[in-house]
Image (spheres, grey):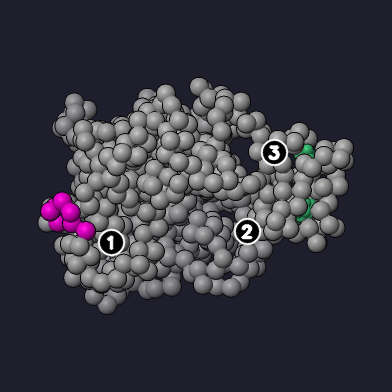
């Protein structure tokens, strides 16, 4: 297969384009052949065997409904699945391996969840044809590969799969009741007590599933997955909603699940967590909503470095024009004239919760990462800085104009994206709207957006506001790995240009490491007492955090990215004895 034609049926409107304009311009149709035809639902349909890939129809369609895609030359096989004629095509599948944690990285919208659903037996592939394939056809399709052996086992009933879905927020819609009862119901391994302890679920066992937070829901979903008896555990984005400590714990936990009779498959956008969990990783590439390809597995370290590089050498495919490199940041020297704001010791009581802040300074043009558990007072702290809340103790001399993107976004609004982003469209088309790929969303209503789309709109809105300090609370949530890297670049570009400072609360350590020059660390007990410390240099801040979770990190020699040391390894012991948990 050399090329595929994609028709966006929602956009295709033959009545409004002048009765199949594409048919009239297609040179193959003009020769009297049936390249573009009318489908049963009265939309355009392209016969891929006859299409010569001239691309004439693409710009002619007034509704951008057609895409003609030349597939990479290295792609020899037919798709494993296609969602219909001229629809998304998935090529190949990741291969589960007993005793190993196999990871998957790649953009959203290129078929990761589809691939998982096929392996999990939820979706029967059609091998690009019109009807479901039989097991014999699937097994023949994968002849000579490891996936062949896997599907033989599926056919013989030897594979039992337990699957944690991506959207844990949908769980309360189907599972109803008390957490303890729900988990006991699925405990086929008699490991309820152990898993509850490992995933720290004791405090919420008596709660109703619909009342627990996103992070709690995520851990309950992971617990329910591993309590089931299975020999293939699949986790679709197991760290979203989790704070940094929980991420590291969950990553550690998932690592322990693979043994000689058990395989584990993980889709993950947090590259530090993935690096820690996985033995091998499949990179997925393609074009969003058009096609996706699962590359052959690589050792985790190589796979993540290759991903950051943006070029798959073996496949000769470039999927990003720039490689991502992690620069070593020198601690900045503080010049008082460049100060944005400062604060002495502060405290603020809000109901049962008390926030205390140790003294600190934010300089102009600084990007400061903020790490801390949820419910620890990060938002309260920013409200104090902006003057919307007054401290009970201490006084902030210099209030700054703050633009704030909250953690939880309002998805109910019927407003159009182009109205919400009016400011950004006027002033920041090239530095915010274009790189965040927001043009295609402008005509949609806020309540029609997916989690990732809503996040990008909210980030753009906050960054475009007239202000001196922007606070982004968990901007990486729902963004894929590529979008996180793009966002880092946008922020790093606009900060020096506009002379603003940005505070970024996030739990993705790689994202924060790439972006921030300094770090604030919040500690204490969520919902009771929080203490804001810093800003520190990245090294000091990370040292404080990593010491608490007893994890050390080194820098990868090729990409410069931080990596977690194996517990008890020579490096881990050496760094701990020196008190150097993190290298800047
Ligand atoms: Fe008209 Fe475009 Fe649909 Fe062709 S694809 S029928 S040009 S709307
Ligand atoms: Fe016809 Fe294919 Fe050319 Fe489009 S790209 S005009 S469908 S031959």
Q: Is residue 83 visible?
A: yes
- Helix, strand or loop at mark 1: helix
In percent of width and height, residue 377 lies at 31, 64
Q: CA distance from mark 1 to mark 2?
A: 31 Å
The residue indicated by pointer 2 is 441
In percent of width and height, residue 383 lies at 41, 68
Query: Which disc, if any, is residue 48?
Result: 3
Q: CA distance from mark 1 to mark 3?
A: 47 Å
- Classify 10 Å Cα crowding around label 1: few (below 14), some (14-19), many (20 and above): some
Residue placed most toward the observer, 291 or 385? 291
**Residues in magenta?**
186-192
In percent of width and height, residue 250 lies at 26, 48
- Classify 10 Å Cα crowding around label 2: few (below 14), some (14-19), many (20 and above): some
- Helix, strand or loop at mark 2: helix
In percent of width and height, residue 306 lies at 46, 29
Name the residue located 86 percent from the left edge and 47 percent from the top edge: 24
Name the residue located 27 percent from the left edge and 33 percent from the top edge: 98
Residue placed most toward the observer, 202 or 160? 160
Question: Residue 81 colored magenta?
Answer: no
Callout in the foreground (1, 3) = 3
The residue indicated by pointer 1 is 216
Name the residue located 47 percent from the left edge and 51 percent from the top edge: 479
Q: Label 3 CB, ligand 2: below 8 Å?
A: no
**Quarter of the render that holds ligand 2:** top right
């Amino acid at each position: 297969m050399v090329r595929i034609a994609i028709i966006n049926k929602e956009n295709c409107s033959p009545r409004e384009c002048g009765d199949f304009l594409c048919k009239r311009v297609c040179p193959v149709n003009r020769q009297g052949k049936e390249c573009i035809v009318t489908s049963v639902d009265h939309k355009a349909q392209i016969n891929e065997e006859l299409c010569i890939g001239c691309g004439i129809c693409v710009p002619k369609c007034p509704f951008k409904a057609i895409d003609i895609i030349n597939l990479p030359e290295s792609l020899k096989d037919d798709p494993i699945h296609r969602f219909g004629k001229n629809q998304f095509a998935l090529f190949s599948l990741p291969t589960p391996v007993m005793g190993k944690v196999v990871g998957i990285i790649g953009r959203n919208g290129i078929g990761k969840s589809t691939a998982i659903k096929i392996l999990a037996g939820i979706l029967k592939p059609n091998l690009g044809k019109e009807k479901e394939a039989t097991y014999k056809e699937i097994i023949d399709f994968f002849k000579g590969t490891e996936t062949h052996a896997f599907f033989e086992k599926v056919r013989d009933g030897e594979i039992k799969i337990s699957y944690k879905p991506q959207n844990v927020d949908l769980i309360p819609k189907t599972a109803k009741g008390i957490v303890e009862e729900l988990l006991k119901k699925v405990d086929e391994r008699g490991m309820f007590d152990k898993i509850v302890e490992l995933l720290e679920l004791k405090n919420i066992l008596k709660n109703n599933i619909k009342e627990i937070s996103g992070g709690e829901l995520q851990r309950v979903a992971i617990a329910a997955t591993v309590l089931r008896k299975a020999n293939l555990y699949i986790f679709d984005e197991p760290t979203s909603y989790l704070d940094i400590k929980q991420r590291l714990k969950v990553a550690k936990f998932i690592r322990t699940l693979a043994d000689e009779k058990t395989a584990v498959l993980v889709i993950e956008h947090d590259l530090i967590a993935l690096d820690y969990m996985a033995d091998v990783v499949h990179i997925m590439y393609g074009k969003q909503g058009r096609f996706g390809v699962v590359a052959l597995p690589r050792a985790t370290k190589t796979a993540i470095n290759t991903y950051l590089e943006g070029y798959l050498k073996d496949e000769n495919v470039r999927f990003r024009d720039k490689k991502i490199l992690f620069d070593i940041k020198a601690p900045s020297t503080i010049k008082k004239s460049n100060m944005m704001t400062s604060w002495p010791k502060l405290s603020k009581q809000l109901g049962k919760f008390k926030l205390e802040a140790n003294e600190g300074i934010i300089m102009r043009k600084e990007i400061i990462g903020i790490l801390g558990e949820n419910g620890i007072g990060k938002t309260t702290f920013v409200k104090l800085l902006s003057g919307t809340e007054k401290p009970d103790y201490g006084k902030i001399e210099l209030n700054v104009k703050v633009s704030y993107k909250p953690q939880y976004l309002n998805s109910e609004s019927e407003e159009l994206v182009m109205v919400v982003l009016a400011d950004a469209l006027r002033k920041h088309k090239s530095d915010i709207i274009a790189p965040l790929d927001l043009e295609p969303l402008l005509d949609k209503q806020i309540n029609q957006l997916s989690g990732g789309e809503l996040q990008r709109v909210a980030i753009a809105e906050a960054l475009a506001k007239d202000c001196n300090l922007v606070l982004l609370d968990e901007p990486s949530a729902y963004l894929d790995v590529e979008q996180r890297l793009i966002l880092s670049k946008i922020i790093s570009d606009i900060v020096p240009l506009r002379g603003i400072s940005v505070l970024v609360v996030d739990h993705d350590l790689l994202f924060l490491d790439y972006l921030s020059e300094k770090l604030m660390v919040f500690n204490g007990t969520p919902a009771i007492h929080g203490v804001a410390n810093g800003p520190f240099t990245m090294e000091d801040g990370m040292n404080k955090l990593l010491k608490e979770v007893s994890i050390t990190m080194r820098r990868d020699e090729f990409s410069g990215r931080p990596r977690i040391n194996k517990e008890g390894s020579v490096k881990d012991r050496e760094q701990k004895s020196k008190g150097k948990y993190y290298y800047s």
